[in-house]
Amino acid sequence: MTQAGTTEPDDLALAAEFPAPERAAWQRLVAGVLRKSGALPEEFDGPPESLLTTRTYDGIEIQPLYTADDEAAPAGFPGLPPFVRGARPEGTGWDVRVLHANADPAAANRAILADLENGATSLWLRVGGDSLAPAALGEALHGVHLDLAPVVLEPGEEYEAAANALLAEFGEIPDSEVVGTLGADPVTLRARTGEAQDLAPAAQLTARLAAKHPKLRTLVADGLPYHEAGGSDAQELGAVIAAGVAYLRVLTDAGLSVDDAAARLEFRFAATADQFLTIAKLRAARRLWARVTEVSGGTGHGMKQHAVTSTAMLTQRDPWVNMLRTTVACFAAGVGGADAVTVLPFDAAIGQPDAFSRRIARNTQSILLEESKLAGVIDPAGGSWYVENLTDALANAAWREFTEIERQGGIEAALASGFVRDRLAETWEKRAKRLATRQDPITGVSEFPFLAEQPVERAPLPAVVPGGGLPKHRYAEPFERLRDRSDAHLAEHGERPKVFLATLGPLASHTARAMFASNLFQAGGIEPVNPGAVDDPVAAFRESGAAMACLCGSDKAYAEQANDVAAGLREAGAKAVLLAGKPSESYRGITGFAYTGCDALAVLTSTLETLGVK
């Protein structure tokens, strides 16, 4: 202290009483924890933290710890190229965009006005096909102030008719103040239908409107078809950037400059419950597009981004959990710098959302924006060693995907040849395996299911476009199909298929594996019958009315009793006897094993077949 009673700056040290942290010390602590859990083999001589490294579907390694030594490419500044930290310098939040696909214009209008009166700031309308007819746009938008609530169309192949119908609704609004997105997207139409599309008419429409309506966007490059086909984040990015390049080419051929052409485009991406990958994806996308426009002769254009909570991650079973998934996805989209965000209602995988689910979807965004003040900080993830490294790695992986598509002749040629489909199928195969083994768990479906849940009924959604193009997956579908079989069995027989849990020993020794088995079987719609601690599991099996059993106990109990109990169960009429534990040839009479990391989908499918469930 000085005579004046002040503290000299050199005397101040944050956490001065603690030793300086060293990576070696942290590694020793990690090794100790892993050794206690049995995850660190005695003969292992590598860095212990390497056992905690995970890998994304793009092969990007996620480390358990990032430090200042993990340098990444400079992210720049908000509002300036390469726009990693945001396309806008002011960082004033995002546009709350709601989706409507109801073919009934009167019903659509009621829902639209309710959304706009309660927090929504723009509209996303599916037009054409089984959705709203272009000619009905006026009735659906009755009472909407289009200068305050921009409209984004998804018109499929009817984009010109939809564009004319929408523009007719602007009335006395000056042409220079018309805002919105007409949504022409022949590349996505080809991806969804498998049918060749001509890009020239969309380019000609854009060229006609560009000078008259400088704030109007005409084209959309949509990443949802690639995401919904099971693709990785880099594959979605690569395909979207390739679609953007295809549109740049036809627009410049139609007479627009690169900068003018880029200003006519909007990009759509999926936001998932993997918040850090979603944040990195949106940041990487802006960097990629800035590079494309720069090398194309432009000024390095900012990307207009529309993030949509993933349809692939939504479930039909226990749909209430979707509220949590979409909240995380919305948070990630906002942090990642999306210009507009659509939170799909929790029942969107079931059918037409009702007023309650729409309200929850709107309020999810309102809470994040107004109560949580999420938009109060520009690029809040910026500077994080982890996020910056992930953004850089994802940008590089996506650039490789994009350049490979370009080597195939561009996105249209890559779709026509099946190159894109095959690449996405490879990733889906890996993803499907991780879903089946519950390495990628789905809460409420493959993990912690609730068999007694009441079904949620909704009117069916109109089809977006006819099939024939890229496949469309929802991650929960394989498990939900098993639950459907169980429901049909319940309706026909008055009870669900059952598996008896043959518990060995006291509660303390069998509870862990009994809970594991119970959770597993319910994921397939199979009711577990748990007798608790019993002296004679075979006798309890006879009284249960079940036709199949699963042994649950400790390793010691298995060594002492498994063979005899399995034989007794088979003699008592069990069609099959499973064991909750790792496979071993020392057990006799066991027809299968259920354990952490097993192919749960295969075990459940086989069990239903054994029980005669169609």
Image: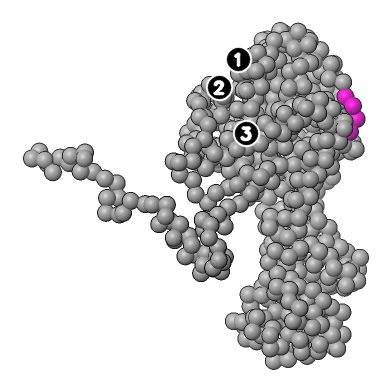
- The C terminus sits in image quarter: bottom right
Mark 3 or mark 2, whichever is nearer to me: 3
x then y, percent, for residue 352: 79, 43
In this picture, residue 214 sits left or right of residue 71: right
Q: Are marks 2 and 1 in contact (CB under 8 Å)?
A: yes
Q: At numbered mark 2, what does the secondary structure look like: helix, strand or loop?
A: loop
The magenta segment is 192-197
- At which x and y percent is residue 284? 61, 32
Say which residue label 3 marks.
395
The answer to whether residue 571 is above or below residue 89 is below
Label 2 to label 1: alpha-carbon separation: 9 Å
Say if mark 3 contacts mark 1, CB within 8 Å: no
Q: Nearer the viewer, residue 216 or 283?
A: 283
| SS label for mark 1 | loop
| Quarter holding residue 183 | top right
Mark 2 vs 1, N-terminal side: 2
Disc 2: CA contacts within 10 A as few (<14), some (14-19) or many (>=20): many
Q: Which residue is labeled 1 in the image?
A: 299
Which residue occupies 53% across, 57% down?
A: 46
The rendered magenta stretch, by its main secondary structure, is classed as loop
Q: Nearer the viewer, residue 148 or 506?
A: 506
Residue at screen point 85% across, 16% down: 201
The residue under the point 71% across, 15% down is 261
Cα distance, mark 3 to mark 1? Answer: 20 Å
Name the residue beneath numbered marker 2: 81
The number of discs equals: 3
Q: Nearer the viewer, residue 461 or 45?
A: 45
Q: Earlier in the sequence, mark 3 or mark 2?
A: 2
